[in-house]
Amino acid sequence: MATVDSILETAALGKSFGGLHAVKNVDLCLARGEIRAIIGPNGAGKTTLVNMISGRISPTSGRVRFNDRDITALRAWDRVVQGIVYTFQVTSIFKNLTCYENVALAAQRRLMGSAIDRLVLNERQIADRVQAALLEVGLSATGDQRADTLPYGHQRLLEVAMALALSPELLILDEPMQGLAPEEISTFCDLLRTLSREVTVLLIEHNMSVVLELAEMVTVMDNGEIIAEGSPAEIERHREVQKAYLGK
Amino acid sequence: MSRRSAGKVFALHLGILALLFVAQFVLPAYHHTNLARIMVLATYAVGYNVLLGYTGLMSLGHSMFFAAGMYGAGLPIYYLQFGAFQAFCMGVLLSLVLSTAFGLIALRTSGVSFLIVTMMFAQACYLAILYFNKVTMGDQGFILSKSLESVALGSFEFAFSDPAVKYNVALLVFAGCFLLSAVLAGSPTGRVLIAVRENEERTGLLGYNTFKYKLLSLVISGGISGAAGASYALLFSYVGASFASILYSIYPLLWTLLGGTGTTIGPMIGTGFMFYLVDFASGLTSSYLLVVGAVLVMLILWFPQGIMGSIRARWLPWLP
Amino acid sequence: MSFGPHLFLALLEGTVTAFVLALIALGLSLVFGVMRIVNIAHGEFFMLGAVLAWFCSTLVGGGPLMGFIVALVMGPLIVGGIAVAADGLILRRIRYQPESTIVATIGLLYIIQQLVLTFYGPDARPVDPPVYFRVVFPWFGYSGYKLVVACLSGLLLVGTWLAMSKTKLGLYMRATQQDQEMAQAFGVPVRRVYATVFALGAMLAAVAGVLVVPIQQAHYLMGLDPLLLSFIVVIIGGLGSLKGTMVAAFVVGISDGVVSVFFSPTLAKIVATLLVATVLVLKPGGLFGEEGS
């Protein structure tokens, strides 16, 4: 791994719930700026793995390193400040607040870096950040709308806007394409491609055509372990993967 | 919040305070003292609303903070001949300490468990006041007016028995806490508190330490409630355990719900309304608490947003 | 009396308290487990049971035993009816939302309490025990009725457990508790189950009231203490865990009894609250609760 500029590394990461081993001994290494997809059948441990990276749950074994820093003990909110941003599988936004307020909360966090920043924080700075984020996802006109009045696909985009306002280094998306119409999917893919110029993207995805088109590297999980890793083309041909997915 | 609506909000709040100031010159004596009392109790409701309305945490134990303020101010005056201002500070300090200590333990739970824990701790405080009756005289309560000296400012002397002094001190305390709550609601911190109320997990995953924010909210809420309790002791001279009972935890819930949770003006309106309703009802029957119960049920069935909440929803969306 | 026998007396008192508390807390816990709501008026159902028992004892001729039996039947039935009415008129309309239910049940608390005050008055009135005998220990005599209370409560607890695990209603209740939507999809009449469970919880509290009133007097404010104690029990045991409720009821009941006898009842309540604080610091979900709930 010495030659690759890795932004995230996990070492022997594992999670057990009582007798159930959801994730066993996972060594994952993400290169800076890549788009990585994690695929695998249901129950493979993908979401659990990603939850351990984002800090929502703590591992029973192993360590997580981010930007050469051991973050295993850091709570979820501290990891966000470090640059790891996670968006939920089921859209989780502030339904009763306006789109502006939704993104403003994220923008505000990024601007509140230090105590001094907090004192000089002003609404203008926040507004600029919010507009920039909304523009990038194509939702600039929705500022004053209540978030729950947006169609589902746009709510997904709003979540990405919130993530962007936090200036993430690593963006983790849990099944982002689920529930989107085909045109929305291709817009989303274009967005992710543009973003990946600055941000490392890690996504869990079931939609194979999206994975093949978008991902630079694919990690395949089954039964809590990584069974294969490689480019999309390699993975397509891989025997173990075919066995896991197709039962051959 | 755009600059235009911020101006409107500011004007509205100052307007209300101005109205209250002017009212003392036109009101007959009965309503004069009533309004002074209402303002102190409304301060309590404002404090409660910071936690319930803005942060979304329901507590049934706020009477312990109110009582902390009351006894924190009352006991030093009675035993140590403290001056009014020092006593007030002691009261607020005690309630701040209590809310911090309590928050560190109780905020490990949430939702229903949190509610139950607040209720239990408040009851324990109430019982403790009665248990140490020799010191606190909680059973009968005690009167401060003999021990409380008037405050001298320059060449003026303000006696707390003077109705004008009562009114204006109450107004001053209320104004301070009222404006504090308005500033908080519009601030970045206030925004985070609202976010915690709306979707706590999401807020955490946006990088906010939600425990810290909930604790901050609880401490501010407790402090304002303590300020109300301390003012009550100073202005109305009576310190008794009944103010630590569960009824005094239910009152601010009632007032805030009636006025509209999550609005700055709601608590005041709710307190005033309920005060006069109870006043009216106790003239009719000794079981006036029945009215309290009935109003609570009706509120929740048909009017859950309260007065100001409904006004905000229907006509004036810029209300904080 | 030396320490040993004194402790024995305290343990006896504590055990009786524990059994009664278990009944009351079970009602609260069942309602929370199945309906996911907290009934703040729960203590008032207990009080109603006691007050109705008093009415029965004065209106029914034939001696205290007759009055007791009538009360044991009528009390829970009447209280159950009130509970069903409250469920239909109020709780169902607010769709069992947790916060709204709390406010509504607080309102209910005051309505019930004040109505009792109006019709029953502010005094505490005694009720004769249905059976009177003393169990004579070498060191002291103990009220036989209290032991009867403990036995009856124990029987009721076992009976409830059997009903939960063996009957169709019990099955419905457990299904609704696990997954309400799924249960509804499988044809479980969730609305009726809710009304029944709420009534059941109220009836358990009412029975406890009927049982207890010959020991304590009937007073319109007597519902508050049991309410708080049962809250302590469900928090320590873990909200939603019936096993936890039972265990905690015994822990709290016995310690309450012991501290009350050796020190004072007031101190006992304070100690119980500190107990909760300790549990919360160490295990926020309660002893048997779900992790991090």
Image (cartoon, coloured by chain):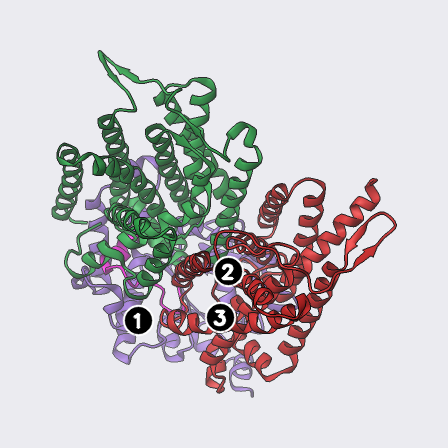
Percent coordinates x, y for residue A232 in the rendering: 43, 75
Residues C287 and C190: in front is: C190
Determine the residue positioned at 66% across, 56% down.
Answer: C215
Amino acid under disc 2: Glu
Which residues are the magenta region?
A85-105
Marks 2 & 1 on one chain? no
Q: Is residue C240 visible?
A: no
| Residue A177 sits inside the magenta stretch | no
Amino acid at the residue labelled 3: Met
Chain C's shade in the image?
red
Residue linked to disc 3: C35
Disc 3 and disc 2 in contact, CB within 8 angstroms: no
Could you say whether the residue bearing mark 3 is in a helix, strand or loop?
A: helix
Say whether residue A91 is magenta.
yes
Q: Quadrant of residue A24?
A: bottom right
* Pointers 3 and 1 within a single chain: no
Circle on res. C44: 2
Q: Residue furthest front?
A: C61
Q: Which chain is purple?
A: A
**Disc 1 residue type (three-letter):** Cys
Q: Nearer the viewer, residue C253 or C9?
A: C9
Q: Mark 1 falls on what kind of element?
A: helix
The foreground one among B286 and B250 is B286
State the count of labels: 3
- Name the chain under label 2: C
Asked whether, in this view, residue A72 is left or right of residue B82, the answer is right
Foreground pick, C68 / C163? C68
Q: What residue would you read off at disc 1? A: A189
State the separation of the CA atoms marked 2 and 1. Answer: 60 Å
Mark in front: 3 vs 2: 2
